[in-house]
Amino acid sequence: MNGAEALMRTLAGSGVEVCFANPGTTELHLVRALDAVPQVRPVLGLFEGVVTGAADGYARMAGKPAATLLHLGPGLGHGMANLHNTRRANSPLVNIVGDHPTRHKAQDPPLESDIAAVAGTLRGPVRRPENPTGAGQDGASAYAEALEPPGQIATLVMPADVSWGEGGTVADPMPARSVPPVDPAVIQRVCTILRGDEPAVLIIGGPAGREPGLRAAGRIAASTGVRVMLEQYVPRLEHGAGVPTFEQLAAYPEQVASQLDGVRQVIVAGGKAPVSFFAYPEQPSCLVPPEARTQILAEVGQDVVGALTALADLLDPDSEPELSTSSRPALPTGALTATSWAQVIGALLPERAIVVDETMSCRPALAGATAGAPRHDLLVQLGGAMGEGMPMAIGAAIAAPDRPVITLEGDGCAVYTISALWTQAREKLNITNVILTNRSYAILREEWGHLVAGGVDARSDRLFDLGDPTIDYVSIAEGFGVPGSRATTAEELAEQFSRAVAEPGPHLIEAIFPPVA
């Protein structure tokens, strides 16, 4: 057995079921190893950003790592934006990067680069087996390390001579470390704060976005009256009828200041104290009110759901959360707007959907429109690197093949990884992609008002304009093998969306409306 097969058999034995790949010459023995290990499904992406984004979506829905297969340093570089998003989401991932044979690296060939240095910026372990015998053991270690709470990217740099060399040995799976509990004294301290008379807010994030955490937070709110809020970005949020719905932290400092006005105790569970996404003149970076104190109930990587449940029991073991009731918005009519598109989605969202939201400037309308829709999972990109929506949908659809996946994508984000459509078609995935087209980087026009005095002049505005020439997403989709349609009215979007979710395989709908003011 060579090192490549030992690695793949070890990963399969540890729990890897999918390898998202964009291989090159140095990875061909790893590709051959996939042929020998049918337990691991190979999925080809035409661009490494699609590969890494898909692995993030898979991990969020499957709760365990997939593997990626990338070609040398440049392939790792192409995948870095969505590896960054994966890291910010704390998604587990075994990231395999091929490398030159050790003897060849010394000659400084054209594709030579310092792969370990680049991978090190992801803040996860980087392993490089030195011989085929060690490949399996490093694979077992990488899988366990990827699951290290709260989840991380474990990178394996595989020299080609290690892959093709004989003497590989399959390693036994290594147990992952369990999630550490929160000190009961911390839970008691938070209980005392909440029983006091100072205005408090409980901000939850991370795994608390799933139903058990939401219900525990709702029980705490019911017994104390504390306001519960969600972090601005939650990796996987269960939303809709039958689960508690909480207000989310807003995007801009002045908006958060209004949300937290009068608060004297900020309790954080499963995330971090709120900070501004960007820095703005004369605005704070830390968004906790200066007069408020911060108490961490559960650090990132600790058992936040256990801590919230224990706190709820301590406060009132008989408390019950308030749940969202079943309701849908009425179907709107007329030309599409920045709000009516969301009403269409809320009115027609199918049962058990997975919604991938990368709508940027159009996002605020969605939460309210879907609060009473059938229960669904909501995935958003956490790192701010655009272009993860359609790739993430691939991973989510492979992890949960029995559930419909809806991708809501801003046109400025879509162009980064539009080739994800090809993989969706190749794998016959049930994904409905809705491209919200306002033919602009509308989010940058919005940011301009926060950073630069005065309106956008014509010369600068050209850098935010995506309408010259017009991008034809319907033609692009059909070129990648995905049926496409275009909607300019709410009635058209409703008809096309209903048809798309009812038919198997991927679809794309280009929904056109004016930019957000």
Image: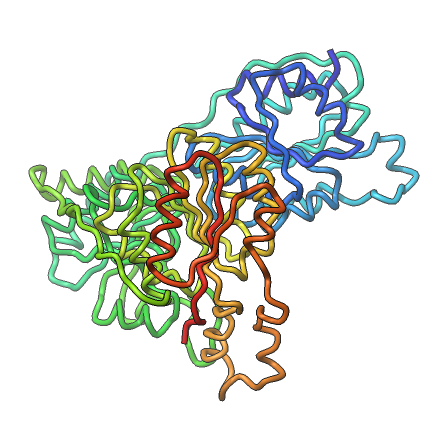
Taking depth in this image into account, of 175 and 242 the one nearest to the observer is: 242
Is residue 87 visible in the rendered image? The answer is no
**Residue 497: x, y in percent?**
38, 48
**Residue 71: x, y in percent?**
73, 38
Look at 61% across and 77% down and name the residue there.
Answer: 462
Q: Is residue 226 above or below residue 11?
A: below
State the quadrant of the N terminus.
Answer: top right
Look at 34% across and 53% down and name the residue there.
Answer: 494
Taking depth in this image into account, of 456 and 447 the one nearest to the observer is: 456
Give the residue furthest to the right: 107
Taking depth in this image into account, of 192 and 166 the one nearest to the observer is: 166
456 to the left or right of 373? right
State the quadrant of the C terminus.
Answer: bottom left
Is residue 488 visible in the rendered image? The answer is yes
Look at 44% across and 44% down and name the residue there.
Answer: 432
Give the residue furthest to the bottom: 454
**Residue 373: x, y in percent?**
24, 47
Taking depth in this image into account, of 324 and 66 the one nearest to the observer is: 324
194 to the left or right of 139? left
Query: What is the tally of numbered marks visible in this picture?
Result: 0
Image color mode: rainbow
Q: Is residue 511 above or below residue 256?
A: above
**Residue 88: x, y in percent?**
49, 49
510 to the left or right of 3? left
